[in-house]
Amino acid sequence: MPYRDMREYLGVLERAGKLKRITREVDRDWELAAVTRTVFQKIPEAVRPALLFERVKGFDIPVAVGILGGSGAIYALALETEEERVWERWRDAQAHPIPPVLVPDGPCKEHVLKGEEADLRAFPHPVWTPGRDPSPYITAACVCTRDPETGQQNVGTYRVQIQEKDQAGIYINVTHGGARHISKNEAAGRPTELAIVLGADPVVGLVGVSTVSPSTDELAVAGGLRGAPLEVVKGETVDLEVPASAEIVIEGIVPCGGRRWEGPFGEFTGYMGPAGDNYQFQVTGITHRDRPIYHGYMSQMPPSESSCMRRVGFEAPLRHHLRGLGLQVRDVHYPESGCAAYIILISMKKRFEGEPKQAIWGTWAFDPRHGKIVIVVDEDIDIRDPFAVDWALSVHMQPHRDIHIEPDTPSAPLDPSIVPAGVAHHERSRMLSSKVGIDATRKHAYPEVALPAREYLDRVWQQWREYGFD
Ligand SMILES: Cc1cc2nc3c(=O)[nH]c(=O)nc-3n(C[C@H](O)[C@H](O)[C@H](O)COP(=O)(O)O)c2cc1C
């Protein structure tokens, strides 16, 4: 049964022992982020809980963090499955999207605020990198926009800097759906309508941060993930459909040519992301549920909620894509140490020489922002074991033959190795970077591995206790 809304999902997390309620009052200007960071630093992923800050100083609105990407197990719970089956859920949802259904009304309209009443500052947006971010940010924004040519909606997660009562700055990478829609509208001299959705059914958050083909309605993929259509309602001040059960919906426009100085912001790279001239968001209305629950993501230095969501969310679609090219790919891994973006590991059954290069190109074609370093290994190498990957790189790869450098590819503009700090992130010098593909598969016959023959190891394991071990 799909979750009715985020509240029902929080109950499931709690019953699974994956939600910690924090009853002590916290300050959203520094403490909430510092507590969340400490949870990520001190509590191993296997037992890490999501957090519900029940008392946020100065507000009567609790804040939920880590509820989608506190760990791989939490991500799987959001999809009502086990970690090993996340991949199947994504594959089925993309193959069988279920379009949303429009309903006349929904809980997200329990309070409708327009004009003077629509005040961004009424919500406990946290400061996520205390001492470094200039102001509070919305991080779990599911930003809905509509393609002015096809009429199709997009949902993407982009950082939103709270600047004034009704003004915010939004950073959207030029390759993302929201930016494509804004640029089409601006070419025709029109503003772009946006709806920032917070705290919808968890699948909406998951599609918001995942790469879905631009020709597919992401809310339909969300329906596919939950196995039932998502109920949507019409916005109050914008011609967009938003999830009916959302906790908070902030509606507004990016005026044609509207830009504001936005940032810097602690980014998923582990460094402060640069400020720049980014989109101006002008609020036109806010709707919310009775006693809303605010939802945020913790990003910044990996491992973080952001890197967990990227890892789990990106691996399945890329594996699906590479298999669709006919490649016998066993596994795809975005290690969180590579910010779940810059390093991609692929294990595959190579049928002929050169095939790993097809996997490398296929990876870059799938999402040109990712895979600054793509490493392909044979299928017997466990790419989730860094030791095994280092070993394959050490003994299956010859640098002059197996390392392929591609200059001038589209960059992940937040990559701090491209240009010095202080170069604004709309600067063109940030737009290009290079990539490296490494074919670390075996290219010829190898000697036998230098381990005792299997039969000896099996025999020892059978009589293990006799050697005095537990
Ligand atoms: C926590 C988190 C924050 C993100 N923030 C941004 C952001 O500020 N700007 C951006 O362009 N992409 C950001 N992303 C990446 C996009 O959400 C992601 O690439 C998504 O697939 C874009 O969807 P779209 O192509 O449908 O717009 C973020 C991802 C995560 C997990």
Image: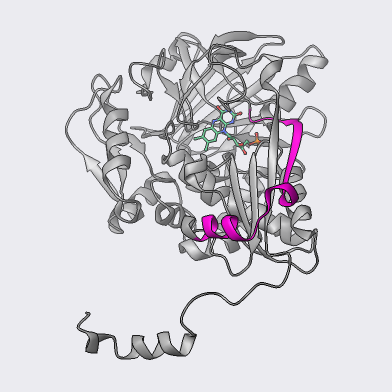
Q: Residue furthest left?
A: 24
Residue at 46% in and 51% down: 4
Residue 97 coordinates in the image, percent (x, y): 68, 54
Q: Quadrant of ligand 1?
A: top right
Q: Is residue 299 magenta?
A: no
Q: Image quarter for residue 226?
A: bottom right
Q: Is residue 180 or residue 466 the one in the foreground?
A: 466
In the image, is 410 to the left or to the right of 372?
Answer: right
Q: Is residue 57 or residue 355 the one in the foreground?
A: 355
Q: Quadrant of the C terminus?
A: bottom left
Q: Is residue 410 magenta?
A: yes
Residue 455 coordinates in the image, percent (x, y): 46, 90
Q: Which residues are magenta?
A: 388-412
Residue at 71% in and 38% down: 368
Residue at 38% in and 91% down: 459
Residue at 52% in and 48% down: 311
Q: Is residue 449 or residue 251 the one in the foreground?
A: 449
Q: Looking at the image, is 48 positioned above or below residue 63?
A: below
In the image, is 228 to the left or to the right of 117?
Answer: right
Q: How many marks?
A: 0
